[in-house]
Amino acid sequence: MTQVPPELPGFDLTDAFFKRQKQLEAGLGIGDIATHSGTKGSETELNWLRMLAEFLPRRYGVTSAFVIDSHGGLSDQLDVVIHDQHFSPLLFEVGGAKYIPAECVYAAFEVKQELDKGNLEYAADKVASVRRLHRTTIEVPHLGGKYDPVIPRRIIGGVLVRRSDWTPPFGESFEKCLIHLDSRDPQGLTWALDIGCAVEHGGFVVKRDEKGGSINIDHSEPGIALIYFVMRLMRLLQVMGSPPAIDYDAYLNSVPGTD
């Protein structure tokens, strides 16, 4: 007589996502205690850093940092930088400020309280300061030969806020602002923003065709803003793949007397 295996218990994915959302919300709520705008901004930034560091796979580092390149270029200070911490070094840390090689950066985010035109443009300028940096890439030896140099992908850019000042939060005015940022550099999309989250109103992601055109913006309902954002972010990071192998000689050659 054939035995029928017992039915396995189901997994309520919807309930699990909502519980995870509540955990993420709790991790971002501490900043409400602060009343001074500077203190509140700093605490909000730290909350985003903690939340992302807890959620993302361990191959990714999450920190506030400057980004540098082998030509001596320097980005603006970024509130949140997602970077490779498996192959790439943290080159310098001076007085608490961290300096990360451009090659190991996956994503850069600006943290604000509100989503509006000024803050979107400010975030885009911060992200552009990273994308303009030079990134080296070299062959990687392996037992059977060498892997070809990786072509560096465009760094993900985004914004993290508490709420949207637009009505509706992701309506026509919001979309026009994102399209305008794309139009500053239609080929390289230097100022383009790709993803973001307004905790009280929803997460959003910008979808483009292979040539960077045909902008389309998808966004979530308010109740799943954070879980939507982190899942979309992980998908974008997945597409990025491995970072380019750093040409350490290029960094060393920038120092006089080391040729």
Image (tube, rainbow, N blue to C red):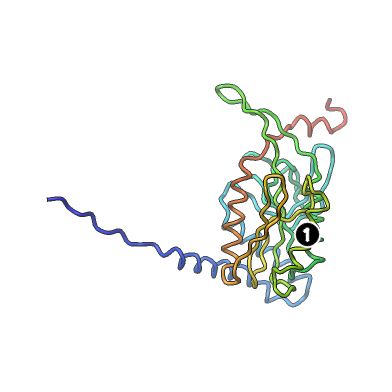
Left/right placement of residue 11 relative to residue 20 reads: left
In the rendered image of this protein, does residue 39 appear above or below residue 141?
below
Of 47 and 138, nearer the camera is 138
- Locate residue 81, reporting x and y percent: 70, 53
- Locate residue 197, reporting x and y percent: 66, 64
In the rendered image of this protein, does residue 125 appear above or below residue 197?
above
Query: How many neighbours does mark 1 have within 10 angstroms: few (below 14), some (14-19), or many (20 or more)?
Result: many
Q: Secondary structure at mark 1?
A: helix
Q: Which image quarter: residue 211? A: top right
Of 236 and 45, nearer the camera is 236
Left/right placement of residue 167 relative to residue 22 reads: right
Label total for image = 1
- At label 1, the amino acid type is Ala
- Locate residue 237, reporting x and y percent: 62, 49
Of 53 and 154, nearer the camera is 154
Instruction: Give the quadrant of the C terminus.
Output: top right
Residue occupying image coordinates x 65% and y 71% = 201
- Locate residue 182, reporting x and y percent: 78, 54
Give the residue furthest to the right: 256
In the rendered image of this protein, does residue 168 appear above or below residue 65?
below
Give the residue furthest to the front: 214
Left/right placement of residue 71 relative to residue 144 reads: right
Q: Which image quarter: residue 119? A: bottom right
Residue occupying image coordinates x 78% and y 73% = 37
Q: Which residue is mark 1?
A: 123
Residue occupying image coordinates x 55% and y 22% = 144
Left/right placement of residue 16 relative to residue 106 reads: left
In the rendered image of this protein, does residue 217 appear above or below residue 114?
above
Q: Which image quarter: residue 251? A: top right
